Amino acid sequence: MRGKHVILGVTGGIAAYKSAELVRRLTERGAEVQVVMTAAAREFITATTFQALSGRTVRESLWDPAAEGAMGHIELARWADLVLVAPASADFLARLTHGRADDLLATLCLATAAPIVLAPAMNQQMWQNAATQANVAMLKSRGVRLLGPASGDQACGEVGPGRMLEAVEIADLVEPMLAVPGPLTGKRVLITAGPTRECIDPVRFISNRSSGKMGYAVAQAMRAAGAEVVLVSGPVSLCAPTGVQRISVESAAQMFEVVQQQLPGTDVFVATAAVADYRPLEIAPVKIKKRNEQLTVEMTRTTDILASVAARTDRPFVVGFAAETNNVEQHALEKLLRKNLDMIAANEVSTCKAFDCEDNALLVLSRGGARVELPQAPKRELATALVALIADRLKSKV
C-alpha cells in the first residue's frame, strides 16, 4: 500500500475507537491516511488522536474557510485512491444511499471517482431493519463494497450482527484493493503448517512444539504477493490469514492425504509443517491405565510428505523447512539434496529459539548453491523476504 492515499471517514458510533487502531494498521502498511470526521464522530473520539496517529490535520467541516478557499472537498476527492468509512453508521448509509451532501464526508463520497468501502457498525436491530437492508442493497448495486459487519456482543448489551470488524481484519481486506499486482499473481501455492498429532489412545497423543506461526506468516505473505493460497494446517491456535483457504487436519496421514488431493494445479509447495516422523504402530481402543512402571509404545515411520511431493513427475516448485538443533547448514544441505528440493529454509530450534516465538532467523539454501541469510526478525518480515526469494527463483526458471 506504499504511497497509496486513503481517506478514512469516521462516523458517529461507539466503534469509532477502533478507527484509531485502523489508522495505525493502514499507515504501517505504507498508506497515507487522511481522516475525515463527522460531527457525530467527534462525540466519541477526538481529532487530536487521529492527527497524532496519521500525521495529518483531521478534516471535519465542509465550511472550513482555509480548506474550502481552494475547493478542499474536491481536492480531497481527487487525492483519494480509496475512501474507507469505518465505522459507517446507519445514518451515514442512509445519507449515502440518497446522495446527500450535507457534510464533508458525504460530499466527497459523491465527488470522488475512487472506490468506496464501508465497514458498518450499529445495533443489531438497526442493521436488520428493512430500511437499512434496502440501503445496503442499493449501495452494493452501485459498486460500494461493504466489509462486515460481524456478529457478537454489542455495547448496548444485545447480541447479533452489527459489530464493526476489527482493525486488522479491515486492513487485511483493504490492502489487496490497493496493491499493485504481486509477483505471484496467478500462481497457486500449497502450504503445510503447524504440528501433527499421532494418537496413542483415545486421550493421548504424540506431538511437538510447533506453533504454526511461521507457516501462517508465509501463507499471509504469499497471499499479499498475489497468489491463491491453500493452507493445510495441523492443530494450532491461530486464525487463518484473510483470503487464505485453510484445511485443518490432525495426523500426518491426514495431512498427506489432503496434500495429495490439493496438489493438482499447484505452482509452489511450501512445507513448513512439523510433521511427525513416527506414529504408534497400534492405537489402543481405550485409555491405557497406569498399571506398570514402564510403558513401551512401538512406533512406525509416517509417509514423508515433502519427499513424496518432490518425487512427482508433475512436481511444483518445492520448498522445505529444516528445524535443527545443531550443524544447521550441514543438515539442511543434506536434506535439500536427499529429498530433491528446489529450496530449503533452515533455522535453529534449540532452547527458546523459533518454537512459539514471534521472531526467527532463516538460512535459505537453493539448488545450484545459492545461499541467503535472513537475520533475526519478526516472522512476518522473514516470510515476506522468503516469498520474495521464491518469486525470484520462479521468475528465473521461466
Image (cartoon, rainbow, N blue to C red):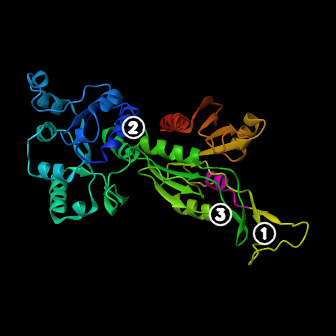
Q: Which residues are magenta?
A: 302-310
Question: How far separated are the C-alphas under marks 1 and 2?
Answer: 49 Å
In the rendered image, residue 12, in percent from the top left (x then y), is placed at 23, 45
Residue type indicated by callout 1: Leu
Residue at the spot of label 1: 281
Q: 273 or 140, which is in the foreground?
A: 140
Q: Which residue is painted at 58% across and 53% down in the image?
A: 192
Picture layout, residue 146 above or below residue 376: below
**The N terminus sits in image quarter:** top left
Circle 3 residues within 10 Å: few <14, some 14–19, many ≥20: many
Q: Nearer the viewer, residue 117 or 183?
A: 117
Task: Residue type at mark 2: give it.
Answer: Arg
Mark 1 vs mark 3, CA separation in Å: 13 Å
In the displayed structure, 278 sits above or below 336; it is below
Q: Which quadrant of the figure has residue 156?
A: bottom left
- Write the residue at 17% across / 30% down: 76
- Which labelled disc corresponds to residue 234? none
Residue at 49% x, 57% y: name it.
Answer: 246
